[in-house]
Image (tube, rainbow, N blue to C red):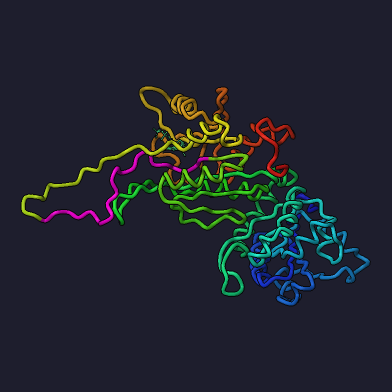
Amino acid sequence: MAQPSERPSVVLGVSGGIAAYKACSLVRLFTESGHAVRVVPTAAALEFVGAATWAALSGQPVHATVWEDVHDVPHVRLGQGADLVVVAPATADLLARAAHGHADDLLTSVLLTARCPVLMAPAMHTEMWQSPATGANVALLRSRGVVVLDPARGRLTGADTGPGRLPDPEEIFAAAVRLLARGATGPDLAGRSVVVSAGGTREPLDPVRFLGNASSGRQGFALAASAAARGARVTLVAANCALPAPAGVDVVPVGSARQLQEAVVAAAKDADAVVMAAAVADFRPAEVTNHKIKKSFAPGAEDDAPVVRLVRNPDILAGLVAERAAGRLGAPVIVGFAAETGDDSGDVLHHARAKLARKGCDLLVVNDVSDGKVFGADRNTVTLLRPDGTAAPVAEADKAEIADAVWDAVASLAGWLSGEDPCRTPASGR
Ligand code: CTP
């Protein structure tokens, strides 16, 4: 491992898939941000990108077999000295060999000797990713604490599309840096399955207009990215967000509150935690016209304006709590968000406590938005409120740090850290 004054040491394993060329950008992202990178390509990876490219980009010698510089024992030293091992792309074959403890080349030997966090970014054709053999290998690796990101969906090598694409190098890099920053704590959410909602719902009025809100979805995306980097399987139900999908996160795009509810309830069935960070419209237009609403130009109609009647949307968070109480939802930890201001009837915490009691969730992440604070800000101050009345302030932090604080609170609430789990057996054991 790197000494405190040294650059963090990353071993980047590259296995033999066409996405190997994208790993070149990953090397650059690491080196330009002050990491020392040793690239370990498999023999098949070298069919796609040559050793000279890896050496030039990393500024370090490249070993591809256990037979080079044997006196340095690279098959042991590289893994022992790493602060993080990333494998991108990880092919079906590499996942199989890693899962079964093979040591038939340098990269698999490194994986056996590494004691640091390991992050794998699979890339392969959809059929290979969805095959029972690959599924079992991935499950085995995850059960051992390896962070195996789900591949992205999209265009594959040929004309076909589906899950199997390597996530964007920038997103893999972001996940790697977060895992590295957690040090020994590593992938503490491995084996957990979580659902996060993000963004703001839009309630249509006619084919071109809607009632909406200004939520960007950034806090929800930060929550999803944090959970994935800590090893969780993440479904991110994203309402109208223009943000890149975090690596390893299954993004379900939705528009309205009712679509968001349908997607969250479906994903929550197998989840260990649900975090409702989305800004959900409480009301929607009672009538949605299938044609554009026109203004009248008739004489005397200048002051005419349509009256929009609204009806209530479901309270998704309270609905989840009710479903859980009725035994129809397993027992995920349920978390709400609340942006509050103080007024004559009470301060922010007074209103937040009332909301927590009304919603019945296990944790409420409270933003004080008095005087225009928070909206659009990169940094934020929140309070984590629990039903027993405890209020834990989180010092001003960026959205990624707040996301980590929320998952820390969820993990402690659920007893995931101590090994006891009052809510349910771990997802990995199901
Ligand atoms: N929420 C929800 N369904 C709704 C409204 C809100 O699930 N129809 C969730 C949000 O995702 C958030 C929490 O409830 O996690 C609190 O949202 P907020 O808008 O503050 O709550 P409201 O019940 O709408 O309260 P208010 O009257 O203060 O707007």
Residue 5 in view of the camera: no
x and y, in percent, of residue 306 in the image = 19, 46
x and y, in percent, of residue 287 in the image = 28, 46
Helix, strand or loop: magenta stretch: loop
Q: Quadrant of ligand 1?
A: top left
Q: On the picture, is 273 further left or further right than 342?
A: right
Q: Residue at x 41, y 34 (%)?
A: 370
285 drawn magenta: yes
Q: On the picture, is 355 further left or further right than 21?
A: left
Q: Residue at x 62, y 46 (%)?
A: 227
x and y, in percent, of residue 268 in the image = 56, 42
Q: Is residue 226 above or below residue 58?
A: above
Magenta region? 276-297
Residue toward you, 380 or 12: 12
Query: How many discs appear?
Result: 0
x and y, in percent, of residue 18 in the image = 67, 72
> Which quadrant is home to the C terminus?
top right
Q: On the picture, is 292 further left or further right than 18?
A: left
Image quadrant assignment for residue 88: bottom right
Residue 307 in view of the camera: yes
Residue toward you, 153 or 380: 153
Q: On the picture, is 126 further left or further right than 372?
A: right
Residue toward you, 181 or 255: 255
- Residue farthest left in this picture: 299
Residue toward you, 285 or 211: 285
